[in-house]
Amino acid sequence: MSGGAFCIICGSEPPLTTDRLCELCFRKRTVLSNMPETIQQRRCAKCGFMEIRGGWSNMDSDGIADLRIRENLVLEERASDLQISFSVQPIDDRTSRLHVEVSGSIEGHTFENHHSPLLQTSNAVCTPCTRKDGDYFEATVQLRSAGRKLNEAELSRIRETLDEIINSMEPNPMFFISKEGPVQGGWDLQLGSKSLARTWGRKLAKSFGGTVKESSKVVGVNDGVEVTRLTLSYRKPAYSIGDVIRHKKALWIVDSWQKEGPILRKIARFERTGATWRDMESSNVICSKSEQSMVQILNRDSSAAEIMDPSDFKVTTVALPYDDDGLVDELRIGFIDGEWLALPVSDMR
Ligand SMILES: [Zn+2]
Ligand SMILES: [Zn+2]
């Protein structure tokens, strides 16, 4: 090789870049980064979510600026050691100016660049909001009680659990209720999401016992895929945990729920049994937990205790429960078959 290397533009001596330019000519011909002067984006006018790569999500102003810069900044392909920083200058509700500083190294030379594109936001309506407006729903949830009507208090406790679920999950624009209201024997809701309906169904069975039945119906075809709607029917048992029920001629307390039915504890002596939902259809609540009272023991002997009757404040005597330990100073009592009955100590909670 001859020592005659020189800049192909101006003839300068080395050092030269790989395409044989001196630093000055190289800098004139090289741009570290490019960015359009304006960037357009769409925001849902109803919920404020931003359109991001064809979907919709919620993002703060720095997060969205960062994303738009990544999408729109074009870098010289040989650039390395890149440093990008930015700030957002709000102009009005729909416009802001982004100040972007870029530095990097190309062929060992440090370059710096500055861009200040205008970020403009136009109004749109996102897919979930369009669906909400159009009475769109994916699932119907039917709330019912086995064998009777759901009362107002039960209904509001059941309904609260849906709000709890929505608040505890990652925000999802499909977690909406498009319609709800009373129907014969219960309450119906239309939900935007099948998964929300299923999650709620599982929570209901866990909290209040009972059964959840699912069925699906094809309502149309979209791009060759069948569109189905889910109906989820929840049947709450007519009894709750802590209620005294009569079952197979004996008195029991509802202890807890399992999939097939409740676990019962006998009042008269130590005995636990599992019953099926079907078994329990013929049993009835004798004294619900809300009708029971906690009372102080005024006097006790080995088999009975004196307490104050919560209805007339007169001192009365009740038999101690089978599992009395001789120490407790309170009893849970229920008015059953015409008299006060002390419930087992293990059911006092
Ligand atoms: Zn040159
Ligand atoms: Zn929206």
Image (cartoon, grey):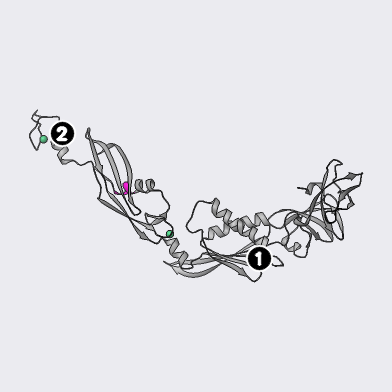
| 14 relative position to 271: left or right | left
Quadrant location of ligand 2? bottom left
Above or below 100: residue 119: below
* Residue appearing at x 79%, y 52% in the figure: 293
Going by the numbered disc 1, the residue's amino acid type is Arg
| Location of residue 86 in the rendering, given as x and y in whole percent from the top left corner | 32, 42
What segment is highlighted magenta in the picture? 68-72
Q: Which mark is residue 23?
A: 2
Q: Which residue is mark 1?
A: 144
- Percent across and percent down for residue 318 are 89, 51
Taking the image as shown, residue 279 lies to the left or right of residue 53, namely right
**Residue 94 visible:** yes
Q: Kindly report the distance in space between the C-alpha atoms of the residues bearing marks 1 and 2.
A: 80 Å
For marks 1 and 2 on the same chain, the one whose residue lies earlier in the sequence: 2
Q: Is residue 263 left or right of residue 311?
A: left
Whether disc 2's CB lies below 8 Å from ligand 1 is answered yes
Q: Quadrant of the N terminus?
A: top left
Q: Tag 2: residue type?
A: Glu
